[in-house]
Amino acid sequence: MGIHRNIILVGCILSAVLFIALRVDGAEHQESLPKILYDQYKEVKPRLENSPFGVPLFIKTDFPPSKIHCAVYGLMDHPFAMIRKMLLNPGNWCDILSLHTNIKACTWEKIEHHQDILTLYVGRKYYQKPEDALKLALEFHGADSPEEYFQVRLSADKGPFFTRHYRVELDAVPLPSGKTFIRLSYEYDFGEALETALKIYYATLGRKKVGFTVVGTDKKGNPVYVKGNQGLIERNAVRSYISIQSFMETLKYPEHTRFEKRIHRWYALVNEFPKQLYDLSENEYIRNKVQENADQVRLQKNLRLFLNNKN
């Protein structure tokens, strides 16, 4: 029973973790990043226009020993200034990340030296109280430059199941078309125990999970899609894109209606890819998210009270 539960948790945790993990290579200095991103846009533009994901995304992955590294390139159909304003606000990331089925809640706080911390409560796809979920604390850093570029970085030294060295980054630049080009890059380390658990997961509970890349055809001529780590990364890259898209699209509504609009929009977009992204029925997802949002509001309120009393 314990092994079965752990395998389920591995799938849930990795699904949620890959949803938020990213890093930019150290050789890329801050001052050269805008130029690098524009050059990368020119390079991947044909792939974005002919994306197999149904949305303008291109994914590059690398699997060095005991490590996962991925870069996701995409186009957002929203003005750069609006995306920069929204995504440099750490509190908004809780609203974005909590759309994921496995994120039970998210809180945001400032600690010493004005450091922003996001705490994720990660669990199974069914409703779970955040107190029963696993916690992952991420440091939030936002870097802005005049008009032309911004970066968001999330990081953690340790995570669940002996994972470590999380580095999550989102970089963005404006395009002449009025759209925004983004790069999500993520990386984390893992040990032999998790690697073994993943192999068991892919052979059992995750055996039917597929990504978007077509790797062949079956006897009937139907497409065969990639599985394993590559499939997991592709599924969550699309979920990440859809979550940001859902958040941005629903800003046009009155603030008190945005949460409801956001969860319905997220589900509608995810449901366009049932083979890859289906987890729950719409009623189940909406019901869970309403309960989880109430938990998130409660946790955030208690955190504010605690910090106010502490100060």
Image (cartoon, rainbow, N blue to C red):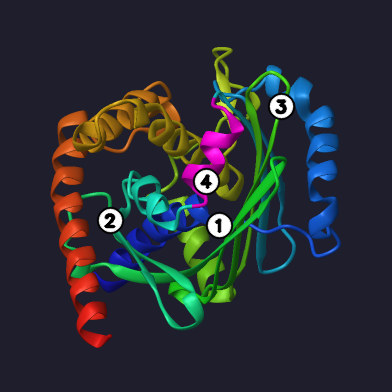
Q: Which mark is residue 35?
A: none
What's under tag 2, amino acid-wise?
A: Arg
Mark 3 surroundings within 10 Å by alpha-carbon count, few (fewer than 14), some (14 through 19), many (20 or more): some
Q: Which residue is mark 1?
A: 21
Q: Earlier in the sequence, mark 3 or mark 1?
A: 1
Q: Nearer the viewer, residue 103 or 244?
A: 244
The prevailing secondary structure element of the residues shown in magenta is: helix
Q: Is residue 241 left or right of residue 174?
A: left
Nearer to us of marks 3 and 4 is 3
Nearer to us of marks 2 and 3 is 3
Q: Which mark is residue 124?
A: 2
Looking at this rendering, what residue extends furthest in the bottom direction?
310
Q: Earlier in the sequence, mark 3 or mark 4?
A: 3
Q: CA distance from mark 4 to mark 1?
A: 13 Å
Q: CA distance from mark 2 to mark 3?
A: 39 Å
x, y percent for residue 124: 28, 56
Q: Which residue is mark 3?
A: 175
Residue, x 19% and y 37% (percent of image)?
A: 256
Quarter of the figure that contains the C terminus: bottom left
Mark 4 surroundings within 10 Å by alpha-carbon count, few (fewer than 14), some (14 through 19), many (20 or more): many
Q: CA distance from mark 3 to mark 1?
A: 25 Å
Nearer to us of marks 3 and 1 is 3
